Structures are given as C-alpha cells and as structure tokens.
Image: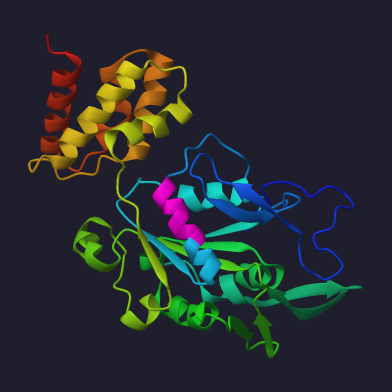
Amino acid sequence: MTNQGKRKKGAPLFDHAGVRPHKNVKIGDTGVVMPGLAERHFLSPKPQPYRFPKQEVAEVAAGLTLGTNVMLTGPTGCGKTSLIARLASELGRPFVRFNCDGETRVSNLRGMMRPTSDDGVLSLKFNPGDLAIAMREGYWVLFDEIDAALPSVLFVLQPVLEEGNRALHIPETGETVEAHEDFAVFATGNTIGYRAMARARHAGTHSLNAAFLDRFGIVIDCGYPERKEEIKRIQCHVPDLKIDFIDSACRVANKLRQDKNFVSDFSTRRLIQWCKVMELMGDGIRAAELTILRKLESPTDAEVAKQAINRQFGYDK
C-alpha cells in the first residue's frame, strides 16, 4: 500500500464519535449523488480528467447503499479499475488497490511477524497487512484482476466479504479485525461469469467458484462504450486534439471490434494512448504503430488493423 498524498498536519481523520464526517457529492454529470468525506483523505487518489459513465456509477452507488461487495467485469482496458479509483478521488475516500497475481500472499493481506529491534534487543513483532489496516480504518479496497489470485488468497477473503459481518482473523495475534462502517470491497476481472470463454487470452487467470462469486451482491458489466460516449471519454484526456481525428479513431475501433477476422482487443485505453501520441507527434499512422499495431496478437491482426486505419483516414491514397 502506498500513500498517494499527505494528510495535513493536525487534520483529524475522525470526528469525536470515531466516524469520519461526510458530505453529499454529485458525481460528474451523471445525476448520481454519493456520500463523500468532508475532508479529502490523504490516501484518496489524485484528481485526474475523467468522464463518469452514468449507468455504471448508478450501479456502484446501489452496491454501496446496500452494503454489498461490487465486482466489475469486462474486456481489458474498458475502464473497470479507473471507475472505482476516480470515484474514490471524487468522494475524497481512501483507496487501496491490490494487484492480484501468483505472487500475492496471505501475509500481504493479514500481515506477518517481522524481526524488530528495541533498544538493541531483537524480537518478533506482528506487522498488520494492508487489508487489515484498510478494514480497521474504513478504506475502499479494490482487488484488481481477482481471477488471477491464488485459491489460498481467495479463501482468506471469504469472511471479509460476508455482508453484515465482515471480519478478518489474525492467527498470529488471535485478534479478529472487524470492518469499519466505511469499508467497501470492489473487484475486477476479465474472465468472470460468461466471460470465462476469454480465459485463454488472459494467462494466469482461474475459475472462481460459485460460493465466492455469490459474495458479490452486484456484478457490473463494463463493456466498451458506444462511439459517441467513447469520443467524450477520450476528449477528457486530449481536449486539444481535433474531434475529427478522435471520431475517426473510434470508428476504426468499432469496426475492428466487430470484425470476425480481428481477434485482438482494441480497448478504450489503447485509443487514448493513440490519441495522446498523435497529439504529440502529429502522425496518425506512426502513432498507431507505436501504441496499437505492435501490441496485437498476430501479424494478421496487425495487417487487418492497419488496413482499417488506412481506409478510415485515407492514408493509402
């Protein structure tokens, strides 16, 4: 866990009742109002340009209102992680992201015994893990790519995900950490539910059992947006780039996503990267080579994509 800012000296994290004071915050132009912190927490992500998707924001808000865990599933680069991080930033809430992979261990979550020196005397002292701290302090926690986590890690999470009785037992100390009322759990994955058919394209992912999935009361499908909405999202990152280029880039992406001869992903994230390099270099096809074509899964996909770009922009004339 890394600090993304610093708390002002003397600024209270809690009021006298031990609960952070809240305020209502309107989320972008979605019309959704959510409870945020009256004072931005020092672990809240830094504000960045972002366009909030109305439906997904409303679904996240529903999950928080119900006190249930929220899972976001969808193709790579469609904005699953960004949505939760930007919401945490907008609301001033502390946010911790766990990147789930084969190296994630139970000790990263619960904590572990570490040697410490006290007046020159070595002894073992328990250091709580990031999840234990997050539960106690009421942070938002995101388990990113949770379908890549090891089964041993997922079993430790099950009691943490129990609605109405979230708890984490620490065997080393005998303590049971109970969750703060502001604690919230989110997870993302590319191969959840019916998207399991994409597992072959996401190395290291595993099937999640039904008992684990049922602990997420809401599952949000974050697909790629419609072209007009995707244009607006990209404009947040490159507001000075000509709209004609952004529109044409989005048309290329939409065509390739529907092309049966094109099997690679063409994500919104890649579109943003393409447009940023285009804005810097002023060369659309060169920018595409640097940000898209060399990432594709096969030379065939690269050729199909290059032809689509040439046709849309007229580079082959």
From this view, report whether residue 156 is shown above or below residue 129: below
Residue 100 appears at what percent x and percent y? 45, 64
Q: Does 190 sit left or right of 152 as displayed?
A: left
At 42% from the left and 45% from the top, the residue drawn is 53
Residue 35 appears at what percent x and percent y? 64, 56
At 14% from the left and 37% from the top, the residue drawn is 301
Q: Nearer the viewer, residue 173 or 193?
A: 193
Report the span colored magenta: 54-61
Question: Can I make out residue 44 in this image?
Answer: no
**Quadrant position of the C terminus in the picture:** top left
Q: For residue 140, what is the image quadrant?
A: bottom right
Inspect the magenta stretch and tell me whether residue 84 lies in it: no
Residue 120 appears at what percent x and percent y? 89, 73
**Is the magenta region chiefly helix, strand or loop?**
helix
Q: For residue 113, what is the image quadrant?
A: bottom right
Q: Nearer the viewer, residue 69 or 189?
A: 69
